[in-house]
Image (cartoon, helix red, strand yellow):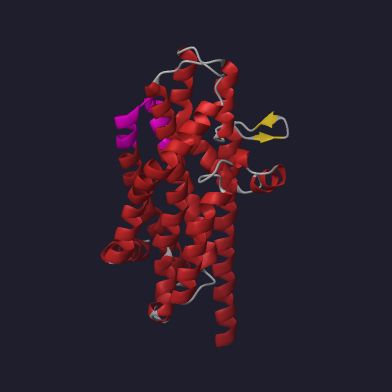
């Protein structure tokens, strides 16, 4: 246990010591927030207005609260995964620079190394993503804050669960990588592609029916939906209280994927959590099996 703790501490220190990797991970959510506000704010606002009955009078602060909550939910849904991949690059860097080989000839067992990388990534990524969440909440507080304490606490849970998903997924993928070039390629693919296939950049309700069906098989979709639901539940309730038609509020929730349907059936919040939890458990299981198989293969080769 002491060895695991020391390795986790070592991995966390190396991540934060790498100023380039750390700063990129830290400022990326802030940059995304600026870009989203600058370029997507009006798009989200127009989408909001288009769902309302013609001539309907509404308060501007509700619009700002709705748009702001949608913006931060998009940022958090993406950042939890991309930052996890960035934090977990240390596992590949150790292979590339020979550190993993040096550690392998020491008394440290391979499964101890695997565990240390996994938990160090969770800790590092959680710290950065919770900081990003705090920045996002400050922004929402400035434009229109409608979240309850329960919403904020559930949002923390959503962020941590997505961090676990990103860590487990990156651990499985990074297991097969061994060079800086491969790190860069995977990082680019994840950064550019995940936001689209998870519905963070563009709600899946705006895709074709065939593509929606495919995306609904991906667990990240339900993570994005949870973050959206807990970010936007308060402002949607405020709209109902301020006289918005119930059909319009439901349409607003549907268009940004707060509600996800399988056929005609609404996927409940509990089912979304279950899907994410089972996916994390499955990916962690795969990661464990990969390390066990690798250790046995190396033992056989030595014999």
Left or right position of 115 against 255: left
- Residue at 47 percent of width and 18 percent of height: 239
Taking the spot 51% from the left edge, 73% from the top edge, the residue there is: 177
Compared with 263, 51 (above or below) is above
Asked whether residue 159 appears in the rendered view, the answer is yes
Q: Position of residue 73 (x, y in %)?
A: 45, 39
Residue 15: image quadrant is bottom left
Give the residue drawn at x 52%, y 42%: 224
- Establish if 205 lies above or below 125: above
Count the marks: how many? 0
Question: Which of 3 and 205 lies nearest the eye of the viewer?
Answer: 205
- Report which quarter residue 95 is drawn in: bottom left
Seen in the image, is 238 located left or right of residue 257? left
User: Is the N terminus in the top left, top right, bottom left or bottom right quadrant?
Assistant: bottom left
Q: Relative to the observer, which residue lies in front, 11 or 196?
A: 196
Residue 109, image x, y percentages:
45, 72
Residue 88 part of the magenta-drawn span: no
For the magenta stretch, what is the residue range?
A: 137-155
**Most distant residue in the front direction:** 55
Q: Residue 144 in magenta?
A: yes
Closer to the camera, 157 or 143? Answer: 143
Against 152, residue 55 (above or below) is above
Main secondary structure found in the magenta portion: helix
Q: Give the side of residue 57 with respect to residue 302, left or right.
A: left
Looking at the rendering, in which quadrant would you find the C terminus? bottom right
**Left/right of residue 287 with respect to residue 78 in the rendered view:** right
Q: Position of residue 246 (x, y in %)?
A: 57, 16
The residue at 60%/19% (across/down) is 247
Q: Is residue 108 visible from the viewing direction of this image?
A: no
- The residue nearer to you, when weighing 115 against 211, is 211
- Quarter-of-image position of residue 96: bottom left
């Amino acid at each position: 246990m002491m060895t695991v703790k020391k390795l986790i501490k070592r991995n966390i220190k190396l991540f934060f010591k790498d100023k380039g990797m750390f700063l990129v991970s830290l400022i990326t959510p802030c940059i995304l927030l600026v870009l989203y506000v600058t370029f997507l704010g009006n798009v989200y606002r127009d989408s909001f207005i288009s769902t309302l009955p013609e001539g309907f009078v509404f308060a501007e602060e509700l619009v700002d609260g709705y748009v702001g909550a949608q913006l931060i939910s998009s940022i958090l849904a993406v950042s939890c995964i991309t930052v996890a991949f960035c934090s977990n690059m240390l596992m590949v860097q150790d292979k590339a620079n020979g550190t993993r080989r040096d550690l392998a000839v020491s008394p440290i067992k391979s499964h101890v190394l695997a565990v240390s990388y996994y938990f160090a990534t969770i800790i590092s990524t959680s710290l950065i993503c919770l900081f990003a969440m705090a920045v996002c909440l400050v922004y929402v507080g400035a434009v229109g804050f409608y979240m309850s304490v329960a919403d904020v606490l559930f949002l923390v849970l959503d962020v941590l669960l997505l961090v676990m998903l990103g860590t487990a997924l990156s651990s499985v993928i990074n297991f097969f990588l061994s060079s800086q070039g491969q790190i860069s390629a995977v990082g680019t693919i994840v950064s550019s592609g995940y936001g689209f296939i998870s519905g963070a950049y563009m709600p899946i309700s705006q895709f074709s029916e065939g593509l929606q069906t495919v995306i609904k098989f991906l667990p990240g979709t339900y993570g994005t939906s949870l973050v959206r639901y807990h970010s936007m539940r308060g402002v949607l309730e405020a709209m109902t209280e301020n006289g918005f038609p119930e059909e319009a509020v439901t349409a607003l929730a549907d268009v940004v994927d707060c509600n996800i349907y399988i056929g005609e059936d609404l996927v409940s919040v509990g089912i979304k959590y279950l899907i994410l939890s089972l996916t994390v458990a499955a990916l962690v299981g795969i990661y464990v099996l990969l390390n066990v198989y690798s250790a046995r293969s190396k033992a056989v080769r030595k014999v």
